[in-house]
Amino acid sequence: MLQLTVNGEDRSLPAGSSVSDLVSVLGLDGRKIAVERNLEIVPRSQYGETELENGDRIEIVAFVGGG
Amino acid sequence: MDDANPNVMVEDTPLVVAGRTFNSRLIIGTGKYATYAQNAEALKASGADMITVAIRRVNLSNPDEPRLVDFISPEDYTFLPNTAGCFTGEDAVRTLRLAREAGGWNLVKLEVLSDPKHLYPDMAETLRAAEMLIKDGFDVMVYCSDDPVYAKKLEEIGCCAIMPLGAPIGSGLGIQNPVNIRLIIEQTKVPVIVDAGVGTASDAAVAMELGCDGVLMNTAIAEAKDPIRMASAMKHAVIAGREAYLAGRMPKKRYADPSSPLSGLI
């Protein structure tokens, strides 16, 4: 299992999971989101081929109301 | 009025920011509304075609909570991602790169704040952040103090709109320093948009009468008793202020001047 920190919360995923798998497990498919892995943006086109590693710090953000 | 034909009004030109044309000179924020549905209604009533939005962590425990984009479509409105909550240039760049990835837009609102008590922009850090963002390919509309010296520097490094505060964010105190706002308008070639401080319709009209190219507001609408009605009031205030600016007001006088002729009195 992989131990990850996603938006500040601990999460575990099966070894070999990709960003695409994470997004899908979280129910965020098709959303207007952006994913950052260890402070580097993962372009949407590379979700499938970007494998997660143990200890990765992931941020997933979206648009909310603001001034 | 047209000199050759005094009955024809000269058409106003639309607001153009970084090559993008907007029909409305009012930009509204999307924070502090009771619901996104109310927000969407207010937006419709305001006639605005550009809105500011923030970027935040997705709520993982409730992925089905209401989302802004379900109520206000980026297909219909220009989303202007902001950097609210950022205190350094690095924070701002990180946030807006994520916004660009999420939405695909490079027109952004930069705000680098300092003390939460007054939310004044940290101008040295704002200038540094603006330089970093412009180098990274962003079109930067910049929230700034009403200091003409810094406003000039921000324009010189390539910001596409200068957005001085009228009063502290969320204060609703109106335009506190019209002299400085006017100085900034006179020296600036890109659009000048008063951002923050508007409390009611007359404040928006004052900003536009000074010659601003637009007004950006959030709390004045969101925290009105009837936000939708206030959005409509703001729409009219911005139009009225702009028209009055273009019309050119009468000179102020120290004494009365009767409106009816003095000759022919019986």
Image: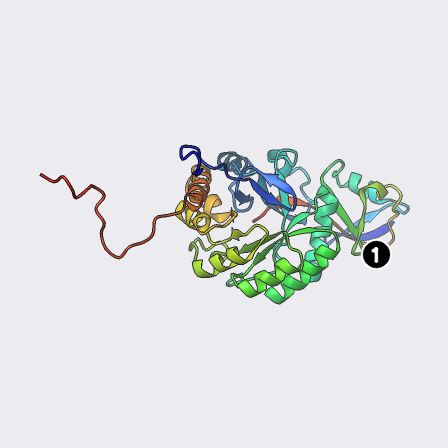
Q: Position of residue B179 (x, y in %)?
A: 44, 60
How many numbered marks appear?
1
Q: Position of residue B147 (x, y in %)?
A: 53, 64
Front residue of B210/A27: it is B210
Q: Quadrant of residue B232?
A: top left
Quarter of the image where the C terminus of chain B is located: top left
Q: Residue at x 75, y 54 (%)?
A: B136
In this view, the residue farthest toward the left is B266
Residue B22 seen in the figure: yes
Amino acid type, residue under disc 1 in the picture: Gly
Front residue of B140/B184: it is B184
Q: Quadrant of residue B68?
A: top right
Identify the subunit bearing mark 1: A
Classify A31 as above or below B130: above
Q: Position of residue B54 (x, y in %)?
A: 62, 48
Q: Secondary structure at mark 1?
A: loop
In this view, the residue farthest toward the right is A16
Quarter of the image where the N terminus of chain B is located: top left
Front residue of B229/B24: it is B24
Few, some or many C-alpha atoms within 10 Å of disc 1 (few <14, some 14-19, many ≥20)? few
B200 with respect to A49 (left or right): left
Q: Residue at x 47, y 44 (%)?
A: B221
Q: Position of residue B91 (x, y in %)?
A: 69, 59
Q: Which residue is mark 1?
A: A55
**How is the rendered protein coloured?**
rainbow
In this view, the residue farthest toward the bottom is B124
A9 with respect to B43 (left or right): right
Residue B86 seen in the figure: no
